[in-house]
Amino acid sequence: YPESFFSFSSSDENVVKVEKSGKLTANNTGDCVVTVTSYNGLSEKCNVSVFREPTSLSFIDNDIIVPQDGTFQLEPQFNEGEGTSSITYTTTDKKIAKVSKTGVVTGVTAGHAVITCTLPNKVSAKCNVTVENKFARIRSNLDPSKPMVALTFDDGPNGNSTLSILKTLKKYN
C-alpha cells in the first residue's frame, strides 16, 4: 500500500517513534499506544511496551522431573523491567528430553538431559531434566469386591508434586 493510505502515530515518542512506513523505533523503556489510521478515517490502536534487554536469566525450577511422554512448561524469569521478544531453547539429548520453541519439555525416555535457554544477547540459563518412566499404570489384578481409592492430581505449574506424592504413597503402601 502507498504510504498515503495509512498514517501512524505514537502517544509518547520518548518511548517509541513511528516512521511514515509504520516502522517502530524504541527510544526508552516504558509504555505507549501506537495508532494506525487509514485514508478513510478508520483506526486501530496497539499497546506497546519497551523493556531493557535482560542482564540475567533464571528458571523457577532449575531441576525438574518429567515422566516419559509427560510435559513441563519452562518459565524463564527476568529482572523487573527487562524482557525479550526472542528465546531459543536447546537440549543436550533429544533422545531423553525434547524442548519446543516455546519451552515445553517432553520426556522421551528415562535419563538425564540439560535444557538451555538463550537470549539474543547471549544471556542464558540451564535446567536439569530427569525423565522417569511413566507414573501411572493400570493393574489387571484388582478385586472389585474390595474397597478402592482413586486419586487425581492437578499439579498446576509444578509438575514435580505428583511424583513426590506418589513416592510417599508407595513408601507407606
Image: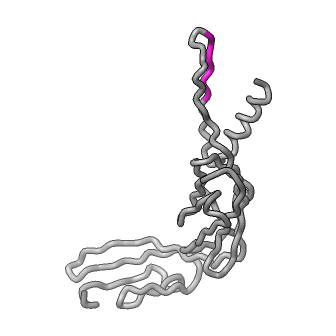
Q: Which residue is at the front of the view, 165 or 83? A: 165
Q: Answer with the quarter of the image where residue 170 lies.
A: top right
The residue closer to the viewer here, 14 or 4, is 4
Residue 3, position in %: x, y? 28, 90
Quarter the N terminus occupies = bottom left
Total marks drawn? 0
Magenta residues (range): 146-151
Which quarter of the rendering shows the C terminus?
top right
Q: Is residue 147 magenta?
A: yes
Asked whether, in this view, residue 169 is left or right of residue 84, the answer is right
Query: Which one is in front, 91 or 61?
Result: 91
Quadrant assignment, res 98: bottom right
Q: Main secondary structure of the magenta part?
A: loop
> Eyeballing the image, is 158 above or below 143?
below
Q: Position of residue 20 (x, y in %)?
A: 36, 90
Q: Is residue 168 above or below residue 98?
A: above
